[in-house]
Image (tube, rainbow, N blue to C red):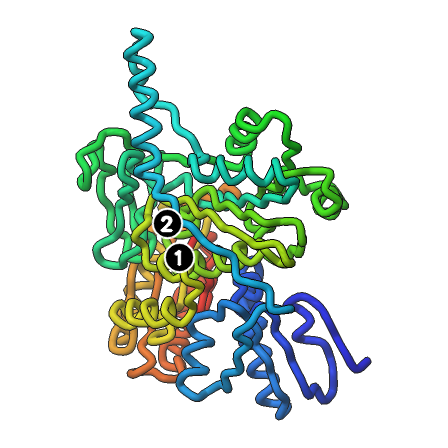
């Protein structure tokens, strides 16, 4: 065997003398194994394996991870660039729709109609997920028999408290990540430092009272599209519609053969699709990724939007992208608008440096889980105290213990300790890893007695 192609596990293929390792879409979080031990990143394993074998490793991406691009800029990696699209295809034009203004206009129309009819105003006014611009552009494509792809990446967003009048979202003052709403305890919590606050009843930004704890999912968007475009054939591609064997391929075949007009889906419609007849891509809400409680949320937003924008105009037909958002001033959108990766990277790097996030530090996540919440909390607190007594704060900033963003999974409660390990004071990370090993050895017997499982994740891809 001379060539091996596969998923992340292929990096461990028993080739005696590998000469070339290629990691395609190196920025993808799926290269990190997060559901079993060891929690490795196949990209990083590829780099290490290549160094041992004296081989060449190629990390390919149109939107490289900040860490990889930083390594290229600093001379650790060699930077090679392909600035033009295949076959000299033009980049699509991108338009941003400010949904705060759109919703205000929509609500004004509803209020006028209610006043004229004499009906009472409901507590929560109805909302639309489709802006006037996107509706017009979809209608135009249907008339021209061209394809439309719509993205609504719903994951995680329902836990964000949002003002539906101006788009304001509460953020942690210490960590600059969104606060997560916990419906059981009815509070907002930061899943980095553990800070807790009450959810607002009045928006501190605009004074509005339409505070909501949910957003539109793909099913709701599908229903609205069906009402607006009753003659169009609409396919929905998400976890619910692709569980059966072959369903994913069947949906793509239907759309590719033009048996359907609109393909609506989660992030699975954003990457790798090549349909020459698609001239319009619509993003229902760019905020779904942007508002996750993760320091990489801006980077993931830029990557996802850039990837999905690339589905439009892949032939001689001009492409257009309409991105809807309540956060129209966000810097990630500013750079998506102009296809400017380097501009985004520069701004994101300054933010990472100020708050000591990677590549200027190494993140270590220690997860505690068990069926008894009190035992989990006690174990996490003792573990954290042992680390402090061992002097870990000389090289790292210790945050927590705090509830996980998803505090209970499979009937097990989850708590986190997060360490920001300084690359200045501990360049190799050896000191923090040795401290973690000592702490684990000291509490091992107690963890068994309390029936608490501890998982240490170096360079996690998220803290959900």
Please state, as top left, top right, bottom left or bottom right, where the N terminus lies in the image.
Answer: bottom right
Task: Please give the name of the residue rendered at 49% of the width and 35% of the height, measured from the top-left corner.
Answer: 135
Task: Please give the name of the residue rendered at 37% of the width and 49% of the height, measured from the top-left corner.
Answer: 291
Residue 53 to residue 380: above or below: below
Residue 325 to residue 72: above or below: above
Horizontal side of 391 relative to 69 (left or right) equals: left
In terms of image quadrants, where is residue 104? top left
Circle 1 — which element?
helix
The answer to whether the residues at label 2 and label 1 have Cβ atoms under 8 Å apart is yes
Between 314 and 170, the residue placed more toward the observer is: 314
Circle 2 — which element?
loop
- Residue 334 appears in view: yes
Task: Please give the name of the residue rendered at 52% of the width and 55% of the height, measured from the top-left corner.
Answer: 309
Rendering coords of residue 182 (x, y %): 34, 39
Q: Residues within 10 Å of mark 2 (few under 14, many from 20)?
A: many
Q: Residues within 10 Å of mark 1 (few under 14, many from 20)?
A: many
Horizontal side of 187 relative to 221 (left or right) equals: left
Rendering coords of residue 425 (x, y %): 29, 83
Residue receiving disc 1: 297
Work out how far the residue at label 2 is from the one at label 1, CA to CA, in angstroms. Answer: 7 Å
- Residue 372 appears in view: no
């Amino acid at each position: 065997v001379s060539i091996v192609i596969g998923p992340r596990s292929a990096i461990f293929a028993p080739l005696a003398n590998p000469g070339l390792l290629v990691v395609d879409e190196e920025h993808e979080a799926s290269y990190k194994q997060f559901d079993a031990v060891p929690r490795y990143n196949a990209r990083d394993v590829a780099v290490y394996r290549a160094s041992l074998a004296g081989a060449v490793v190629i990390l390919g991406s149109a939107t490289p991870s900040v860490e990889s691009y930083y390594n290229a800029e600093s001379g650790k990696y060699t930077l090679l660039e392909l600035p033009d699209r295949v076959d000299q295809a033009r980049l699509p034009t991108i338009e941003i729709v400010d949904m705060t203004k759109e919703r205000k206009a929509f609500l004004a129309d509803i209020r006028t109609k209610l006043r004229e009819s004499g009906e009472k105003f409901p507590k929560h006014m109805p909302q639309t997920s489709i802006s006037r611009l996107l509706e017009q552009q979809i209608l135009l494509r249907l008339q021209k028999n061209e394809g439309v792809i719509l993205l609504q990446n719903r994951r995680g967003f329902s836990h964000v408290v949002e003002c539906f009048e101006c788009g304001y979202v509460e953020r942690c003052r210490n960590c600059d990540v969104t606060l997560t709403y916990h419906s059981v305890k009815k509070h907002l919590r930061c899943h980095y430092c553990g800070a807790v606050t009450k959810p607002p009843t009045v928006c501190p930004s605009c004074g509005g009272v339409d505070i909501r704890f949910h957003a539109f999912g793909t099913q709701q968007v599908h229903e609205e599209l069906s009402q607006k475009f009753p003659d169009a054939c609409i396919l929905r591609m998400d976890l619910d519609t692709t569980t059966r064997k072959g369903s994913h391929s069947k949906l793509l075949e239907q759309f590719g053969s033009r048996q359907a007009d609109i393909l609506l889906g989660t992030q699975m419609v954003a990457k790798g699709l090549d349909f020459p007849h698609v001239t319009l891509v619509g993003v229902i809400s760019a905020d779904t990724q942007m508002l996750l409680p993760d320091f990489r949320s801006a980077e993931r937003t830029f990557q996802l939007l850039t990837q999905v924008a690339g589905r439009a105009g892949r032939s001689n037909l001009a492409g257009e992208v309409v991105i809807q958002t309540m956060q129209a001033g966000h810097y990630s959108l500013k750079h998506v608008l102009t296809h400017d990766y380097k501009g985004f990277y520069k701004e994101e790097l300054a933010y990472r440096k100020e708050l000591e996030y990677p590549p200027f530090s190494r993140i270590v996540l220690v997860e505690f889980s068990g069926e008894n919440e009190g035992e989990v909390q006690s174990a996490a607190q003792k573990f954290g105290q042992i680390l402090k007594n061992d002097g870990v704060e000389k090289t790292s900033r210790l945050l927590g213990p705090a509830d996980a963003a998803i505090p209970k999974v499979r009937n097990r409660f989850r708590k986190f300790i997060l360490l920001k390990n300084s690359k200045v004071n501990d360049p190799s990370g050896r000191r923090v890893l040795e401290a973690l090993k000592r702490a684990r050895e000291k509490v091992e017997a107690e963890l068994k007695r309390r029936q608490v499982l501890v998982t240490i994740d170096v360079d996690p891809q998220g803290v959900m």
